Image (tube, rainbow, N blue to C red):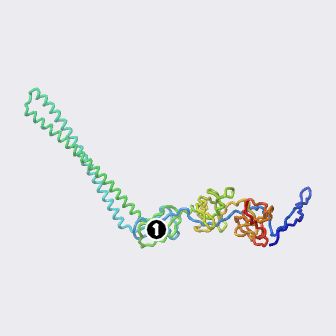
Amino acid sequence: MTPIFRRICQTLAVGTALATGAAALAQTATEWPVEVVRLDPVSAPQESYVGTVRARDMYGLSYGTTGCIVAISEDAKRMQVAKAGQVLVELDDQHSQLALKTAQARLDDLRAAVEERQLAVTASENDDRRRAEDKAFVAKEFERNQAMFRRGLINETTMEAVESRMMDATFAAEQAKEAMASARSAKARAEIAVGIGELELRTAEINHEDLQLVAPFDGVMIGFEPSVGACVADGALAGQIYDPSRKSVDVYVLISRLSAQDATGVSRGAEVTVRRGNGQTCGGVITRIDTEADLESQYVQTTIDVDETCAPELFLNEAVAVEMASAPDAFRLPETALLDGAVYIVNEERETLESMAADIVSREDGAVVVRLPGMAGRLAVVDAMSEGVDAMLDTSEPS
């Protein structure tokens, strides 16, 4: 190995002419066995990550019943675009129409039975009223004959006849009340039957409605390729639909950016820029950060919701760049300064080299912009593969 040596030399730096004149400054430079460069912070571009556009919410379009297709919306199939309430597919409804008409006829019959029961209730109420009036009349006659019997004006036989009529009137009134209660109960049962009939009719209507596949909202469809004559099963998937204004981007971000406690940290709610291949930009907000990092790459999946005014122009699965605010302590170095994701920094006091992990911000024309927190003003090795590196490496154990 080449021994470490130091040579002091003087260099003259000429400053820019000021209003009062020019001044000369003398600076001391140190020559090392390896080529070094002083780390001066640069205005780093925004950090960029490649992401993929996807639908924020994807809904399935499924058939509600079993049947054979008799009609298709050709416009929806050709354009793969649907409007809310638009009928996309119609299934054969012959059996459904019969079931619907049968349920309606049964309901009409049950409603007629209720009306009939109402007539019976009305008749029983009228009979109860007549029986009550007859009982009241007989009761008055009984009281009058009882008074006459006590005074001896009528004999016992006549009194017994009056008592018999009183008993008959009372019994008839009680029978009328029982008949009225029975009529009301029969009407109540008829009304319950009508309720059941209405449910059966509604079931038939729902089954009939299930023969039509309707778009739930304005959206773009995926995989919608039905064919007339094809028979489908209940629950079979006809395609998918999503709201074009609700899109997001999945991107993988370095865990160091997510876990940083300073201004370099990225968190939920942070605003980013989504840039398309044609240069168009859209705003976005980080809404989700996964809880698990990739074991080898140490990247974490992050979801960004795209601005709804811009999202409709993005294509699903389109590759876009997600630009995040650059972090401080960014430096531009030759690509040769990087070795396995690290940069060699000179320890001027101990005259040795230290390996420092560097986060790559961007690459440009043989140079690389890296982030090295707290390294401003330090010296970095230009060529990490040069011969002098091994001689200067700090191999001592940390104190």
Q: Amino acid at mark 1?
A: Leu
Residue 36 percent coordinates (x, y): 80, 67
* Residue found farthest to the top: 151
Taking depth in this image into account, of 85 and 244 the one nearest to the observer is: 244
Quadrant of res 272: bottom right
The count of marks equals: 1
* Residue found farthest to the right: 21
Taking depth in this image into account, of 317 and 393 the one nearest to the observer is: 393
- Structural crowding at the residue carrying mark 1, measured as other residues with C-alpha within 10 Å and reported as few (<14), some (14–19) or many (≥20): some
- Horizontally, residue 368 falls left or right of residue 175, namely right
User: Residue at image x 74%, y 59%?
Assistant: 374
- Residue 203 vs 121, above or below: the answer is below
Assign the C terminus to one quadrant of the image: bottom right
Residue 34 percent coordinates (x, y): 80, 69
Taking depth in this image into account, of 322 and 255 the one nearest to the observer is: 255
Assign the N terminus to one quadrant of the image: bottom right
Quadrant of res 363: bottom right
Residue 395 percent coordinates (x, y): 74, 66
Q: Secondary structure at mark 1?
A: strand
Residue 338 percent coordinates (x, y): 73, 69
Q: Which residue is mark 1?
A: 237
User: Residue at image x 37%, y 60%?
Assistant: 203
